[in-house]
Every structure is written in C-alpha cells, then in structure tokens.
C-alpha cells in the first residue's frame, strides 16, 4: 500500500476507534458492496438484467436495490410492468 493509502487507513482507524485490520475489512466490505451495486444498476440500465437480477447480482434484497436505484436516479426505465412483476414476485 502507498503512504497515502496507509494514512487514510490510519485516519479511519482513529475515527472508528478500532484496529487497523478491522478498519481495512470494513472498508473493503463497503467498497465491494458499493461496486457490486454500481455494476448491477449499470447492467439494469443497459437492459441486460431486470431489477430482481440486479438485486441478486449485488447480493441485496429487491427493496435495497430499489432504494439504491432511487438514490442514484436510475429508476427512469422502471415502469408499471416492472413494478407489477416485482410486486407479484414478492407475494
């Protein structure tokens, strides 16, 4: 790791009041989760997968991926048909 990366981890460790290895593990989990969500929503936008497929790819619930999509302004191609299919799947 570079000095800048180590400094970033050390600052994170200080703020979180934990160990360096714990801080690294948390950062990796959050980063990997965020990247999976980003990729899943990108594939959804391209029409490669549906919203349920995006949730599965990201390893989150349908509700969570819908929330993330909404937060990121991705739901522009989510229509009533998609909603009906998702509601039916939840029953």
Image (tube, rainbow, N blue to C red):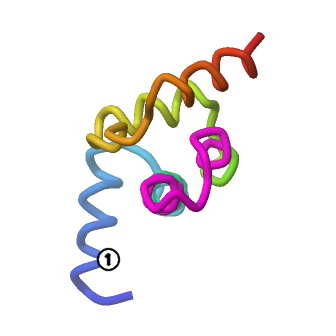
* Drawn side of residue 91 relative to residue 57, left or right: right
Q: Residue at x 30, y 64 (%)?
A: 10
Q: Is residue 2 above or below residue 85?
A: below
Q: Would you identify the image quadrant in which residue 45 lies?
A: bottom left
**Depth check: 10 or 39 in front?**
39
Residue 58 versus residue 31 in the image, above or below? above
Tell me if 8 is positioned left or right of 62 in this view.
left
Look at the image and give the residue range highlighted in magenta. Answer: 39-55
In the image, is residue 18 part of the stretch drawn in magenta?
no
> Which secondary structure, mark 1?
helix
Name the outermost residue toward the bottom: 2
Crowd around label 1: few <14 · some 14–19 · many ≥20 (10 Å): few
Where residue 52 appears, as percent x and y from the top left, is: 65, 39
Residue at 24% over, 73% down: 7
Which residue in the structure is indicated by mark 1?
Answer: 6
Asked if the magenta segment contains residue 42, the reply would be: yes
In which quadrant of the rendered image does the C terminus lie?
top right
Compare residues 63 and 84 and report the one nearer the observer: 84
Say how many tags the image has: 1
């Amino acid at each position: 790791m570079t000095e800048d990366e180590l400094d970033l981890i050390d600052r994170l460790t200080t703020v979180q009041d934990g160990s360096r290895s714990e801080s690294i593990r948390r950062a990796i989990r959050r980063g990997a989760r965020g990247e999976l969500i980003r990729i899943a929503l990108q594939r959804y936008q391209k029409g490669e997968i549906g919203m349920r497929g995006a949730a599965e790819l990201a390893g989150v619930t349908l509700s969570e991926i819908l929330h993330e999509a909404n937060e990121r302004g991705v739901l522009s191609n989510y229509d009533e048909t998609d909603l009906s299919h998702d509601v039916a799947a939840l029953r």
